[in-house]
Image: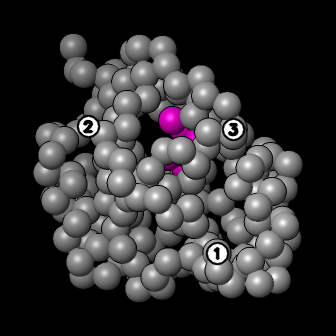
Amino acid sequence: MTEAVIWMLRHGATTGGEGFRGRTDDELTAAGFDSMAGAVATIGPVDRVVTSPLARCRRFAEYFAAGCGIALEIQPAFAEMDFGAWEGLTAAEVVRTDADRLEAFWRDPRAAMPPGGESFAAFEARVVSAVDALNAGSPERVLVLTHAGVIRVAAMHAQGRTVDTLFDLDVPHASVHRFDQQRAGGAVPDAASDTARPT
């Protein structure tokens, strides 16, 4: 039987740099692309490749899927959270104008959201639904090219953790995170070194 596992790979470094870049459609840097190539080399062959539609994920996914001879699946549910008025800003820039709301967001993203942005409840629901759909399929090795926020939500649910622990999981650029499809609560983050909260 094929091993049933979902690998989530965060995109590499982007031309936009750090900050809240949820729906901001930055491209990968050359180094960011190369770091993703190095990361996928550690996981072995896959049966499916699924990607966020955003360029920083999709560009590498197109290259990788073509090299594997696999049809690429673009899944909008794996896009990053929309940060509304905070899009394109660093945390330091947000602090200057909206410090209280930002601190509340770090403490409990369900209770505070960026002005004009996506509610955490809506973000969480679409990510969980998309992961559940992958789990409901036949046992496969699935690679998902996605974002830090998506990976954190998926891990939070798979491990049965509470939302106040959401930002405890470090998700560096080009980090790979394994989710076992057959074992309940089986999200197993493989890498942890990124302490930057914005995605």
For the point 85% across and 49% down, the residue is 111
Residue depicted at 37% across the width and 31% down the height: 188
Front-most of 79 and 173? 173
Instruction: Give how far across and how far down residue 51 sits, in percent.
Output: 43, 55
**Which amino acid, by three-letter code, is at mark 3?**
Val
Label placed on residue 163: 3
Q: Secondary structure at mark 2?
A: loop
Compare residues 62 and 26 and report the one nearer the observer: 26
Q: Tag 1: Cα neighbours inside 10 Å, few (<14), some, or many (≥20)?
A: some
| Overall secondary structure of the magenta section | helix
Q: Are marks 2 and 3 in contact (CB under 8 Å)?
A: no
Q: Earlier in the sequence, mark 1 or mark 2?
A: 2
The image quadrant where one finds the N terminus is top left
Quadrant (top left, top right, bottom left, bottom right) of the C terminus: bottom right
Residue under label 2, please give it. 47
Q: Secondary structure at mark 1?
A: helix
Q: Is 137 situated left or right of 161 in this image?
A: left
Q: Position of residue 145 (x, y in %)?
A: 39, 54
Residues in magenta, as a range: 150-155
In the image, 28 versus 55, the foreground residue is: 28
**How many residues crowd mark 3 within 10 Å: few (<14), some (14–19), many (20+)?**
some
For label 3, the SS is helix
Q: Measuring from the top left, give residue 46's x and y in whole percent.
A: 23, 39
Q: Is residue 131 above or below residue 3?
A: below
Mark nearer the N terminus (2 vs 3)? 2
Observer able to see residue 186: yes
Residue where numbered disc 1 is placed: 91
Q: How is the image coloured?
A: one colour
Would you say residue 115 sits in the magenta stretch?
no
Determine whether 20 is above or below 137 in the image.
below
Q: CA distance from mark 1 to mark 3?
A: 20 Å
